[in-house]
Each structure stands twice: as structure tokens, then as C-alpha cells.
Amino acid sequence: MKQIISILIGTWLVITINAQSLNKDVERLQYVYALKVVINDSVWCGFADKQYDVPLLYYGDTCCYVVNPTEKFLAKYPSVLVHSDNDIQIYQTEKVDDKPFHMHVTFTDDESNIDYRTPFMRCSSLEQTSKTIPDVTSVNEWATMVMHEYFHGFQFKNDGYLDIYETITNAVLPDTLIALAASHDWYRESISQENDLLLKAIDANDIEVSRAYIQSFFDLRNERRERVKKELGIDIVALEQLYETMEGSARYIEYCLYRHFGNFNLSDAKWLYNVGRKYYYATGFNLLRLSDKLEIDYKCGIFRDVSTVEKNLRNVV
């Protein structure tokens, strides 16, 4: 009898723990989709539209959850519906792979894959994320990372953006910008000066002063790009515009979320606007902030033409 009672207690504990885990994970996924609506309504109209929806594959401790999966996913991975409302359907399935960490959007050219020619968002739970990135300790910090990557999915759901990405990165290798900054002091120094000019243009109270900084920014930028083309034989213009558009707008979403959460001071988050190894995150972000300051609309055309932001600012001067 004692053995039977022990087995029953053990089974009850397992069921309780699994139920708690399910509730925690489902609540987090609901929170992510609620934040999508916040961004749609206050930051980037269209982000929450059905036509731009991207399936989200969430890696929990012992299983995966997938939000709004495709028929192709459900055919490949047996799944159980655990939550459904007007906006989202959440399924539970087995672990799709054994990789320790996920926080990215994938798409492939393999027709048998779930992400064939279409974006699929993958993210690890907060607990798994904290093991890989110890500084991430709160749901809101985790959610900003998720939304950054989810915004990449939104980008690639825009008609033609995947084709633009492939055309540009087939012409010039994607890691070219990182390699140039790592290999050439003059390139890295110019990037730093260009970014400083963007920050001064953002902070200036006088529009004419801003215009002067913008002109100096483009003078330096043109000189650097021309030197790369002349000395190294690489035309980086389209690649730089692509990655500043892609990563700058995703970082912009993070920034807007931090402001939404409150108790946020941009001066305490220098990593957002100061250049690092992947400098185009910061320069792209600052180009969008400068466009906001000058009340220049860019959100309608930014994913149809990656030169949109630069063209708009060049017209200012």
C-alpha cells in the first residue's frame, strides 16, 4: 500500500510540475504576442497583421511549443493543441533538435524543411537563455531579444525582401563589413567618426546644425566606401544599407520596448547606439532615430528599397 501511495504521489508531482511548466511557457508566449500588438499600435503599423505572421518555435526544458504553425510543421512533427484564442494557437511537440540555445530566424532552400523560403522564428526559454547569456534575468529582457528576432521574421515576410537579401548577399559576402572593420584601422576609425556625427545630428537643437552634421556624415561615408572600392575592389554600398536597415530597425524595436516597459534611460544603454564589432546595428539604429527627429517617414518603403533611409537623409542636405 505504501508503495502504491508513493507511486501515486510521484505521478501527481510530475503532473503538477508539467502543468506548471505548461502554464508558464504558454503565458510567456501570450505575452510575446501581446507585445506584438503594442508595437503594431504604437511603433510599427502592420507588424501584427496576419499576412506578416511568422510561426514561433519555443524551446522549453523538455519539449517545444510552436505558435501558429504551418500545416507543413504539423505534418512533420506530431503536436497537441494546448491553447487557442482569436489570435494564436499554441501546440506542444517533442524537442525539434538538441541545440542548447536558439534566438534567431531561419529560412532555407531545402524544400523538405519547415522553413523553406519562409521565415521561422526560434527562441529558447528564459531559463535556457539565462544559461547562455547570464545578464538576461527578467522576462522583459528576454522578450526584447525575442521581439528583435521576430522583427526579422516580419522583414522577410514583406514581399520581395528575401529576394533583395539574396541578391545583395550573393554579390558580396554577408560578413564582409565585419571583416573590413576588423582588418583596417582607417575603416574602423571612419565608422566611429560617422556614428559620432549621427549622434551629434540627433542631439542638435538647431535644424541647420543637424544638416551640417548630416552632410559631414555623408562626406565621410562616401570617402570610406570609395576607398574600399578603389583599394579592395569591393562595392559595399548595398550590403551596408541592407544590414543597417535589417539590424537597425530590429534594434529600434528593442529600444521602443524598453521605453514601453518604463524606468529606461537611453544614456544608461550605450550599447544601443555606440558602435561595436557589428557596427551596422548602431549606425542603422541611429539613422532611424535621426529620421524620427526630422519627421521623415521611412517605414512604408524601408523593406522594398534598402537605400530608403539614406536617400531620405541625403535629400535633407
Image: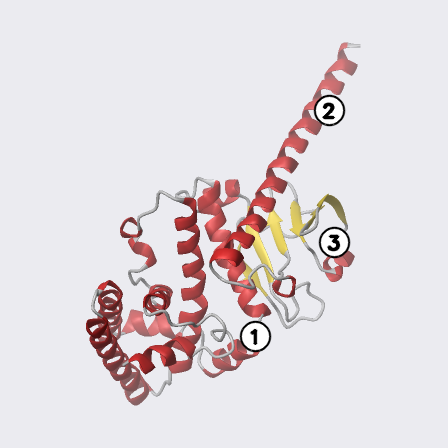
- Image coordinates of residue 49 in percent, x first then y, are 61, 62
User: Which mark, residue 11?
Assistant: 2
Quadrant (top left, top right, bottom left, bottom right) of the C terminus: bottom left
Q: Is residue 218 left or right of residue 147?
A: left
- Image coordinates of residue 301 in percent, x first then y, are 49, 76
Task: Using the rendered view, name the quadrant where residue 297 is placed.
Answer: bottom left
Is 179 above or below relative to 151? below
Q: Hey, what amino acid is under mark 1?
A: Leu
Relative to the observer, which residue lies in front, 268 or 1?
268
Q: Earlier in the sequence, mark 2 or mark 1?
A: 2
Q: Earlier in the sequence, mark 1 or mark 3?
A: 3
Between marks 2 and 3, how big is the CA–CA gap?
Answer: 26 Å
Q: What secondary structure is marked by label 1? A: helix
Residue at figure coordinates x 43%, y 40% from the top left: 137
Neighbour tally class for label 2: few under 14, some 14-19, many 20 plus, Cα within 10 Å:
few
Is 272 above or below relative to 111? above
Is 85 above or below relative to 3? below
Between marks 2 and 1, how big is the CA–CA gap?
Answer: 49 Å
Q: How many marks?
A: 3
Q: What secondary structure is marked by label 2? A: helix
Q: Earlier in the sequence, mark 2 or mark 3?
A: 2
Neighbour tally class for label 3: few under 14, some 14-19, many 20 plus, Cα within 10 Å:
some
Q: Single out the mark in the foreground, 2 or 1.
A: 1
Q: Would you name the residue on which mark 1 appears?
A: 162
- Image coordinates of residue 16 in percent, x first then y, are 68, 27
| Residue 61 in view, yes or no | no
Q: What secondary structure is marked by label 3? A: loop
